[in-house]
Amino acid sequence: MSKIKIEQLNDQQKKDLKLPVELSSNGSWSVWECEPSIFDWHYDSIENAYVFEGKVKVKTEDGQVEIKAGDYVTFPEGLDCTWEISEKIRKVYRFI
């Protein structure tokens, strides 16, 4: 099973991915927001996400990662995990 990949993107990479400059849907990306909470999640397909605000720990069988504002994250297909949101998350995402 692949692991969660977290990257910091430069401005050109953001432009190439057509990431919105503000939290908004743009046809390529959808918006998701969630208040502090804990829940289990399963990824049926690969998800790319860019976090505009917030902080979350995502726990998997391989350990945990902390995701925060400014992170570009790739969640692999087939991943089972638990989200522990400590600060309201505001992100854009797409499934590939």
Image: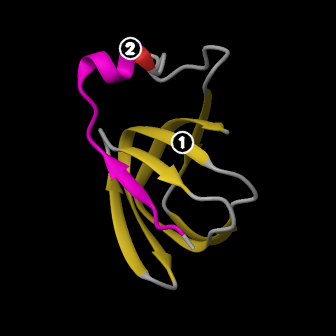
Crowding at label 1, few (<14), some or many (≥20) Cα neighbours within 10 Å? Answer: some
Q: Could you say which is closer to the camera, residue 32 or residue 1?
A: 1
Image point (54%, 42%), residue name: 48
Asked whether disc 2 touches disc 1, contact meaning CB atoms under 8 Å apart, the reply is: no
Q: Is mark 2 on a helix, strand or loop?
A: helix
**Whether residue 9 is situated above or below residue 22 in the rendered picture:** below
Left or right, 88 with reference to 94: left
* Callout 1 amino acid: Asn
Look at the image and tell me in which quarter the C terminus lies. top right
Q: Could you say which is closer to the camera, residue 13 or residue 86?
A: 13
Q: Is residue 10 magenta?
A: yes
When asked about the image quadrant of residue 9, the answer is top left
Q: What range of the chain is rendered magenta?
A: 2-15
Query: Residue 34: x, y in percent?
Result: 56, 49
Query: Residue 18: x, y in percent?
Result: 48, 16
Q: Is residue 22 magenta?
A: no
Look at the image and tell me in which quarter the N terminus lies. bottom right
Q: What element carries label 1?
A: strand
**Whether residue 61 is situated above or below residue 39 in the rendered picture:** below
Q: Name the residue under label 1.
A: 48
Image point (47%, 23%), residue name: 23
Query: Residue 60: x, y in percent?
Result: 51, 78
When asked about the image quadrant of residue 65, the answer is bottom left
Q: Mark 2 points at which residue?
A: 15
Indicate which disc, 2 or 1, sits on the residue closer to the N terminus: 2
Q: Which residue lies furthest to the right in this view?
A: 44
